[in-house]
Image (spheres, rainbow, N blue to C red):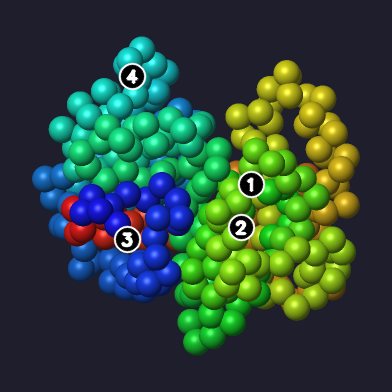
Amino acid sequence: MSTLTHLISWKDWSDDQIAELIDFAVYVKQNRVFFSGHMAGRSMAMLFQKTSTRTRVSFEAGMTELGGHAIFLDWMSSNFLLSDIDFEAEYLSRNVSIIMARLKRNEDLLILQSGSKVPVINGCCNLFHPCQALADILTIVMDRPKDWKKTKICYIGVHNNVVNSLVGITAALGIHLTLVTPIASPDSIVPEVIERGKSKGTISWEKDLKTAVRDADYVYTDTWVDMEFFNDPKFQKEKEERIELMMPYQINSELLKHTKAKVMHDMPIHAGYEITREVVLNERSIIFTQAENRLDAQKAVVLKLLEKA
């Protein structure tokens, strides 16, 4: 990688770099007090085109706990709406130490990266969600520290940005990922990422739900409908079609009878659709711990990128 390192996806990170970042994230979580002043005098620009709860709170709280400052920028009320993205990015990067951008299109994120003179973190786009995947693996490492490399994850749902990032990070770490993805449109699949998983033998597909979860250590699901479309009347017909197709793949108490796996979900949750409220609150759910780990995972990313910068 070049001197200036970004986190857009795991495609640009080697296996060793990802493994090192996981180890560092564990260290950051276990030793929060050691890093309390590391970002003193530094600011992060947080650019949001997509709505957010966890990404905004975890990055902003993380920068505060590290002794730095986070600046919230709403895309719709900024001049990113009016000007060339790379021009605005270069200006922004002359004022801050690091940029986190949560954008709708990966193409726009890459243009922003091209203009930035500081590291850029992908806070979620249509193709990737690397910070979520890092927090997911941190959760598993903390949950089973002695044998986490033997973990078997089963993802059930729509092939989306979270899946792409999970495929990339599990391939790098040698963790097996089984996909049950009845909906997998070509626009959402990144062939380069899938090939990485195939070459490492860390990815497989399964159609039968009970077979897929039987030996899983973790069962993972996500929303069936992108958050910006879930309450959009224009998307109502497609939403109904997706729900009808995906309901047999819901994570519910009946499915849990066929597995000893713990349950994961990256949130926000649409209870009654991809997962039942009962399972979210079940003792085998580690969903809220998973969400909490976004904080330390992202602190590790910020510290590592600025160390390299």
Left or right of 185, for residue 83: left
Towards the viewer: 269 or 202: 202
- Contact flag, marks 4 and 2 (Cβ < 8 Å): no
In the rendering, at what x and y percent does residue 143 appear? 53, 76
> Relative to 224, is 135 above or below?
below
Dividing the picture into quadrants, the one containing residue 300 is bottom left
Q: Secondary structure at mark 1?
A: loop
Whether residue 205 is visible to the viewer of this picture, yes or no, is yes
Do tag 1 and tag 2 residues touch (Cβ < 8 Å)? yes
> What amino acid type should be assigned to the residue bearing mark 2?
Ile
Q: Are marks 3 and 2 in contact (CB under 8 Å)?
A: no
- The residue where tag 1 is placed is 189
To which residue does mark 4 refer? 84
Q: Residue at x 25, y 36 (%)?
A: 116
Q: Residue furthest top?
A: 82
Near mark 1 (Cα within 10 A), the count class, few <14, some 14-19 or many ≥20, is some
Q: Are marks 4 and 3 in contact (CB under 8 Å)?
A: no
**Residue topped by disc 2:** 194
Snapshot quadrant of residue 264: bottom right
Q: Residue 270 placed where, x, y %?
A: 70, 42
Left or right of 64? Residue 261 is right
Q: Secondary structure at mark 2?
A: helix
Q: Nearer the viewer, mark 1 or mark 3?
A: 1
Measured in 3D between alpha carbons, the distance from the residue under mark 1 to the one under mark 4, in whole angstroms, is 28 Å
Q: Earlier in the sequence, mark 3 or mark 2?
A: 2
Residue under label 3, please give it. 300
Cα distance in 3D space between marks 3 and 2: 26 Å
Kind of residue at badge 3: Ala
Residue with the most extreme left position: 41
Please report whichever mark, 1 or 4, sits nearer to the chain's N-terminal start.
4
Left/right of residue 27 with respect to residue 193 in the rendered view: left
Q: Earlier in the sequence, mark 4 or mark 2?
A: 4
